[in-house]
Image (tube, coloured by chain):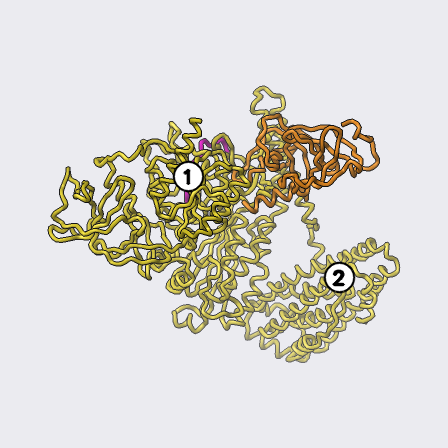
Chain colours: A yellow, B orange
Amino acid sequence: MAPALQIHLNPVSVMDDLLREFLTETGESLDVADGELLKLETDPNNRDILNSIFRLVHTIKGTCGFIGLARLARLAHAAETLMDEFRNGRPVKSGAVDLILRTIDRIKLILAEIERSDGVEPPGADEDLISALEAEAAHEAPAPLPAPAPLAKAEPAIVVALERELLPGEVPLDELERMFRETAVEARPKVPTLAAAPTLVPHMLAATPEAEHAPATALDPAAAAAQTIRVSVSVLEHLMTMVSELVLTRNQLMEISRRNEDSDYKSPLQRLSTVTGELQEAVMRTRMQPIGNAWQKLPRIVRDLAHELGKHIELEQHGAETELDRQLLDQIKDPLTHMVRNSADHGLETPGMRRLAGKPEKGTIRLSAYHEGGHVIIEISDDGRGLDVARIRAKTIENGLCSEADAARMTDAQLYRFIFHAGFSTAQQVTSVSGRGVGMDVVRCNIESIGGTVDVRSKRGEGTTFTIKIPLTLAIVPALIVEITGERFALPQTSVVELVRVRGDSEHSLSFIKHAHVLRLRDRLLPIIDLGSVMGLSCHWGEHPDGELIVVMQVGNQRFGVVVDSVLHTEEIVVKPLASVLRGISLISGSTILGDGRVIMIIDPNGLSQYAAARSDKTDEASKGEALAGTAADSNKMSLLLCRAGAQGIKAVPLALVTRLEELDAGEVELLSDRSVAQYRGTLIPILYANDEVERKTSGKQPLLIFSEGERTMGLFVDQIVDIVETEFELKLSSGAPDIMGGAIINGTATEVLDVAHFMQRAFGDSFDIPVGHPRERNGRLLLVDDNAFHRAMLEPVLKGNGYSVTTCTSATEALVKLSGEARFDAVVSEVDMRGIDGIGFAERVRSELHMHDLPIIAMASGRNPDSIERGHLAGFTDYVAKFDRNGLLAALREFAAHEDKEKAA
Amino acid sequence: MSAAVVNLEGPSDAHQYVTVRIGGQLFGLPISAVNEVFVPDRITPVPLASREIDGVLNLRGRIVTMIDMRRLLGLKDGTLARMAVGIERTGEAFALLIDGIGDVLLLDPSTYDSNPPNLDEEWTQFSEGVHRLEGELLVVLDVERVLAAIGGARSAA
């Protein structure tokens, strides 16, 4: 029978609609069956569950037989026979459930094969399973139980008693089997018709399956309940697009009617608006699906895992009916599965360990979902061992994600976040389940790509909770329309926390910490992003008479402020994807058409938060992990002078900034209007102590560092000169103290790097106003390009101090963007060795792509390799100076300035 | 140039060109590549986009990406009133910003020449050849290459 059918089916190379529908439907039924079976295992006497599984298997069998899939039909039949045993009162045992699950797996396998091979059932036998199923059914086979009433009592003792009592009743079972066989036979006559039809009358192909399909649905026991129809996704998508257009048009009309007061259109327009709103909602609902659909496979996965790992795991589900956009549902399926597997594998302990810890042997994984303010929150929590902070810390340092010193300073919550970094796994053993170090970063990427966030909480010994927050839908979002330098932008409202107006006299105030703008809002410090300058528009700082208007936004744990010119209104915007050529812009997530027909850009809060994290340094603790990860690659070899200043240990100063090392007799230090000064080479120089803890000697010699900048020279007392090292070091701009530029690990020790610029400023701040050229005068606008945060921080004050207005860029790419923007620069100072596009590539682009042939570009290089200098000149560098040769740099800039003046004069 | 106009109702559009002016030079776009010609209104700049992208605008509900041809061809920004030629590729709408639109010409293959070897490299990458018209030359713009250059410029910048 089976081979004959296959021969008939083979010529049909293209799957027909009926078969395709069968595959989809059966796939869904099987998923349901999976879940039901697991429920049955825990609640063996629940008749409802039994019946529903029986129906499912029966339907599969019936449809398979009908459609000519003999192999499947036989398998389903065997499973059904066993299921019927249960239905008739035989106690459900774990082993039997296992068998049926295995059968279902096999059915899935065959189905997948059929799908792949365009409708041909794969050859092969399932005798192993079938005989096992039959054996199970026959083994200690009880009779069908006529009276279900005692079962409902669910008393095991009675069940056992009944089982025994009914042993002789095997005849009805046989009859039952025969009945099923007859059912199969009954379906069979139709099969050849179907199979033969395509061969005989190919042009009838489309019609025949439909005709055959009608009775099939009629036979389907579940069909009566079906109040649903299948609609293809593309139809829904199209509907959605059309509604989006309608919403836009409605908005435009409303805008017009707002301008015309006495319009007759007002009331019909109002109705149109209401109907459109309802329509939009209804169409949105067609895209919504319960999140339970994404969970369907999880119980099975957890069960299998529990068997594999020898753990007892219970999976609780709450809020499975919570709805969200189908598109999002697809996207979170995999991350969810991964996280549940993780909880089962890493999170929960073995029964033995749990007993030792005084917990019940059975571990619980709790899945819950609920709506909260336009978002769906999904939580995956376990009552397992919790995250191992020590191990995460060790791993973080080992992987170079942050330094030991930083790791020691971080809170547990900050360290937990590292598990979302690539290549991070604390599982000591790689199991088949997890521990390969891929996963959580992928989870985070997947979730962030749909505008969501993921966070983790954990308590040692008590468990771990992952919280996923995702928007309900991606298609229509409420947004705040803001204006910056005359351009409007949309900020997704889901990320907006509040609006703050900062005036001089208001309780919230703006502060500067080393060029970083921060907002003091109640008890928090928030990094501030000037959207105008980030976007390459002009910077509007401090020009608002009423004070700055700041939109406080939150992404994940990170809060930051965004400076805008004005806030216009809020609007439900329809997100339109950007053209593919514009998709690389990280700060823009899409565009939309406003009521007046104008296109505006939608700002991506995730992009902004990354920007804030890279800039905020210490201002927001939660962002620190990110910031550190960002600067980790910022490394370069340089010579450092190590000295001791106070009890707190070693301090470092870049050797290039130190003019001389001296030892000064304490007696030579004099006080001049409360300030220490000393005679040095014929002039009086100000003297400072590196910090309060440096010993103030009254006699004897004390080491002094001499710093010079132009004609200004100062001395800095330290306790001891320790060493000069050449080292590759990474600066972490994470210091709160003004005299410390940041921390770095030097030779394995955490070392603070002194900020020379700060001491210069203190020394010459007010009373020592030695005229140096005309520092206040604007010498010109410079663009400083350096991917090394330390170098930028070092050079910027120097250049500013010499009267240049400085714009800094962290990469050549950013610099190219700045140069092609509105702002004009008189010269560029660029590092040569940079990640991404290097200085030479940058110069070439400036010359060839931006056609700025006259713009002076001054290169800073660590070595004076003649070859590279030659190459640099060819690429378009105007001049070369050694890194840290500040006088050289200033001279080069002066030369260029003079050159400019000459040109202007000419 | 009238001598070059063979017949506007020619049976084939293989050599039918929409002529446009960019920085004084006459260019021809294959008529099959052109969807429409419109006067751009209210272009929204896209911050941080590459220089050649002037912005986006709403054309009857569609968002169109505007490509500044002067910038792409390395010409100075013009002050002339601008026109736009709408084109479409893989479902996305683009428009080329040009100085002005001219006639539709049906050109005979006999007037076609490949690019002169000394033509600026910036231009040869967007053009396959030129048509000799009476009094001037018409540079044939390759729309595919223009769009590819926009994508390429972005990934490089």
Identified at 61% across, 79% down, the residue is A164
Give the tally of numbered discs: 2
> Looking at the image, is mark 2 or mark 1 earlier in the sequence?
2
Q: Which amino acid type corresponds to the residue marked 2 in the rendered image?
A: Asp
Q: Is residue A551 visible?
A: no
Q: Nearer the viewer, residue A522 or B73?
A: B73
Chain part drawn in magenta: A559-569
- Can residue A567 be seen here? The reply is yes
Q: Residues within 10 Å of mark 2 (few under 14, many from 20)?
A: some
Given this view, does label 2 or label 1 mark the residue nearer the observer? 1
Quadrant location of residue B55? Answer: top right
Q: Which mark is residue A807?
A: 1
The stretch drawn in magenta includes residue A562: yes
**A247 relative to A639, above or below:** above
Q: How much space separates mark 2 and mark 1, taking CA atoms?
A: 62 Å
**Residue A240 has which mark?**
none
